[in-house]
Image (cartoon, rainbow, N blue to C red):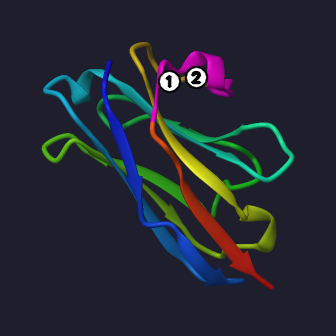
Amino acid sequence: QVQLVESGGGLVQTGGSLRLSCAASGRTFSRYTMGWFRQAPGKEREFVGNIDWSGGIRYYADSVKGRFTISRDNAKNTVYLQMNSLKPEDTADYYCAARRGGVVVTPTPADFGSWGQGTQVTVSS
């Protein structure tokens, strides 16, 4: 298991940007596929994007494609989520997750075994 801690959430206006970070513990970070999910109040947790161990393969939810970018720095045991052109509907708690297997085109939360505590993102209109 890998321990994950997210940071970087906050309040931003529509059209603004935020970068979330997820720091992982352990020496095996590079073996994990990393993902980002989000959960809005009263809604189920939904997939945002995931990235393979090398950073070369990434998949995104249609709702964020072209606006959000996932990247990782294996030397720093950190994965990032750059969020641009934010919309009020992006408001949610954002969670970092890790899985031992490869990337999944449209994963569910059950595909990931380790989770962070979440960081809140609020986009004001």
Residue in view at x 24 percent, y 29 percent: 29
Viewer-proximal residue among 67 and 118: 118
Q: Position of residue 114 (x, y in %)?
A: 44, 25
Q: Secondary structure at mark 2?
A: loop
Q: How far apart are labels 1 and 2 at the CA level?
A: 4 Å
In the current view of this chain or complex, which residue is farthest to the right? 42
- What amino acid is labelled 1 in the image? Val
Magenta part of the chain:
105-115
Image vertical order of residue 32 relative to residue 124, above or below: above
Q: Residue at x 54, y 44 (%)?
A: 95
Q: Residue at x 64, y 60 (%)?
A: 66
Q: Position of residue 8 (x, y in %)?
A: 43, 66
- Dividing the picture into quadrants, the one containing residue 99 is top left
For disc 2, the neighbor class at 10 Å (few under 14, some 14 to 19, many from 20) is some
- Residue 104 in sight here: yes
Residue underneath mark 1: 103
Residue 58 in sight from this viewpoint: no
Q: Which mark is residue 104?
A: 2
User: Residue 40's spot in the image, x, y percent?
Assistant: 77, 52
Up/down of 21 relative to 27, above or below: below
Query: Could you tell me which secondary element the residue under label 1 belongs to?
Result: loop
Amino acid type, label 2? Val
Indicate yes or no whether the magenta region holds residue 49: no
Toward which corner of the image does residue 106 lie, by quadrant? top right
Instruction: Kindly indicate whether the residue at mark 2 contacts the one at mark 1 (C-beta within 8 angstroms).
Output: yes
